[in-house]
Amino acid sequence: MASPLATESPTINRAWEAFVLHVPAILLAWIAAMGISVIGTLVYFVISLVLTTLSGADPNGGGTVLAITLGQLGQLPFTVLSSLVGVLLAAIPALYYERGEVITVQAAFAALLQRPWRYLWAGVFFSALVLVGFLFCVLPGVLIVFVTPLYVNRIFNTNLTVTEAFSASVQALFRSPQGMPYLGLELLTTLLVLVVSICTCGFGALLALPVSSFYLQNAAYNKGLIS
């Protein structure tokens, strides 16, 4: 059962206060994800450069293509791990409103390591659906993206299968009476985040994105889309 604070009327002030409480966990998750990504990029360049140099391959030849391909394979585990850690940025607000307690660094990573394969599969499944949606006239992909807060919450806070969590989230957003009002809030929130990001040359997104995540999770509970 969700925490009583989850059903309170969402406001920017409450979302900001919740964000401030979770700065350590969010900051560490962001740094860890970025650090792993940087290491993966370095691995890619090192493998590509070393193999190209050792083979004496023509920069435009097949040997170079093979070196780049192997470099990308070497980078892949780091990309997957970075994505896994990065999902905490969306999961921490969901865990907070469900549990009603501040999600510490230890609690955040404990939740992540409890079912890592579930979260990896959930990410692959969702990304594939978004890609397919964008291939079909873009709009379906955009609509699927707006399911994200509900989907992340069900993935981390329930025992529903990945497909069941997605189906339940879609039904809540597009078939429940409060679904369209919530979608409207998502659109307004997204627009506000874009404006803040543009006006601050992108730096404002570091604050606007996590604050918006707390706001949308609170709104989802408040409107009964998550119970």
Image (cartoon, rainbow, N blue to C red):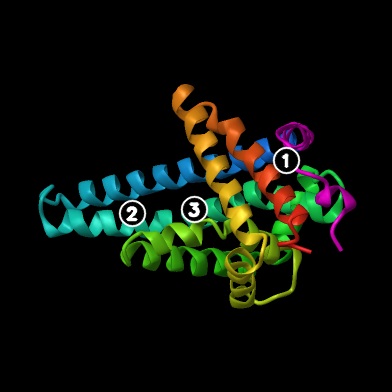
Q: How many marks?
A: 3
- Between 130 and 192, the residue placed more toward the observer is 192
Marks 3/2: CA–CA distance = 12 Å
3 vs 2, front mark = 3
Residue 139 within the magenta-colored segment of the rendering: no
* Disc on res. 33: none
Which segment is the magenta one? 1-21
Task: Give amino acid for label 1.
Answer: Ala
**Image-based side of 7 in relation to 215, left or right:** right
Classify mark 1: helix, strand or loop.
helix
Q: Callout 3: few (<14), some (14-19), or many (20+) C-alpha neighbours within 10 Å?
A: many
Q: Nearer the viewer, residue 187 or 164?
A: 187
Query: x%, y% of residue 152?
Result: 64, 59
- Dividing the image into 4 quarters, which one contains the C terminus? bottom right
Crowding around mark 2 (Cα neighbors within 10 Å: few <14, some 14 to 19, many 20+) is many
Residue at image mark 1: 25
Three-letter amino acid code at the position of disc 2: Gly
Left or right, 54 with respect to 179, comes to: left
**Residue drawn at x 66%, y 37% as measured from the top left:** 211
N-terminal of the pair, mark 1 or mark 2, is 1
Label 1 – label 3 distance at C-alpha = 21 Å
The tag earlier along the polypeptide, 1 or 3, is 1
Residue 74: x %, y % from top left? 40, 56
Quadrant in which the N terminus appears: bottom right
Question: Looking at the picture, which amino acid does disc 3 mark?
Answer: Phe
Q: CA distance from mark 1 to mark 2?
A: 32 Å
Q: Quadrant of residue 23?
A: top right
Q: Which mark is residue 71?
A: 2
Q: Neighbour class for label 1 at 10 Å: few (<14), some, many (≥20)?
A: many
Residue position for label 3: 78
